[in-house]
Amino acid sequence: MDKQAIYGLTYGNLENWLIENGEKKFRTSQIWGWLYIKRVKKFEEMSNLSKALIEKLSANFSFTPLNQVVVQESKDGTVKYLFQLEDKHMIETVLMTHHYGLSVCVTTQVGCNIGCTFCASGILKKQRDLTAGEIVAQIMQVQFYLDSKGEGQRVSHIVVMGIGEPFDNYDNVLDFLNIVNNAKGLAIGARHITVSTSGLIHKIREFADEPLQINLAISLHAPNNEVRTSIMRINRSNPIEKLMDAVDYYLSKNNRRITFEYIMLSNVNDRPEHARQLAALLKDKKKLAYVNLIPYNPVSEHDQYSRSSKEDVLAFYDVLQKHGINCVIRKEQGSDIDAACGQLRSKQMKK
């Protein structure tokens, strides 16, 4: 990893680099166009740049830091990618087809230290943060895959919900968001991008102050401290009452809808009393709160958990609805491939 990935440069970073290296700043938009609109894969293909500039770019930057290892395609159109980084670590990325467009779920860290006891991603402890370039490259690799099909499809939505805690890699994730949102490049609308956090309170407050319109999702998964601490270690230092205070601050600054992710675990967090507690927790936020009930994808390493029955999920949903809480039961995707986040990588590492 001697060279920085070109995808890791924000528009302003690239402009500054060009000026510092004796080039005109208008070259920024040219290079940006080659990268994200024409989507070339080599600096040499940037035909309106001078040979000298191409040599400078080649000497200082690499193109993609990812090597595609495995691609799994589901019957429902979901595609899961296993990528190898330059230091041989593995990460996962997922392409999902929705009625509103094509969404990509990106990974932000190699491993995860949050300690959620139901999650395949945390089986490998955090090795390192991904660079902004490695996160952007996931989007580009998926877009290359779409381009290869010749159907004119493009990535329209992004969810930052893959392996790792995005707010534990805050600066690189913020650069990533600014790069993919830039109107001169991929131009993926801010309101089409969602960042999920397990609840890093100080970072939620910092994110609230950013001049962005990016959507925020909270991985809540429990309505009280006792249950949440038992399944999410982060709740010890970021308990629910302080998390809700941070959410209130975010809502006061943005007045935007916030999603609460809730994985349904049989006889753990899926009882009617849990639904009533969740409704009470979100009562004063229900105009902007949106609960996403998620079917659990069983993971062999966490065999103490099983998915809630359809009847229990519907009963939970009904309680929330009766209390005026907006909610939805997430549609399952990729059930015929390694659906759980981190599952494909874990399987590959055992070979």
Image (tube, rainbow, N blue to C red):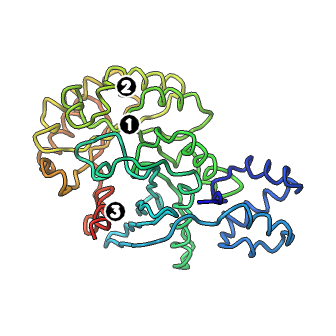
Q: Name the spot of residue 312 as percent of width and height, x first.
A: 12, 44
Residue 27 vs residue 300, the one in the foreground: 300
Q: Which residue is the site of mark 2?
A: 243
Against 223, residue 29 (above or below) is below
Q: Secondary structure at mark 3?
A: helix
Q: How many marks?
A: 3
User: In the displayed structure, does residue 68 sit left or right of residue 226?
Assistant: right
Residue count near mark 2 (Cα–Cα under 10 Å), binned few <14, some 14–19, many ≥20: many
- Observer-nearest residue: 286 or 67? 67
Q: Looking at the image, which residue is at 28% across and 24% down?
A: 281
Left or right: 182 with respect to 347?
A: right
Of pointers 2 and 1, the one earlier in the residue sequence: 1
Q: Amino acid at mark 1?
A: Ile
- Which element carries disc 2, helix, strand or loop? helix
Question: Going from the N terminus, do you reach mark 3 or mark 2 first?
Answer: 2
Q: Which mark is residue 218?
A: 1
For marks 1 and 3, give the one nearer the viewer: 3
Place of residue 133 in the rendered image (x, y in percent of width and height, measured from the top left):
59, 55
Q: Check disc 2 and give the amino acid type.
A: Leu
**Residue type marked 3:** Arg
Q: Which residue is mark 3?
A: 345
What is the x, y in percent for residue 107? Answer: 44, 53
Is residue 52 positioned above or below 331 on the image?
Answer: below
Q: Is residue 6 above or below residue 216?
A: below
- Give left or right: position of 21 versus 94: right
Q: Which quadrant does the C terminus fall into?
A: bottom left
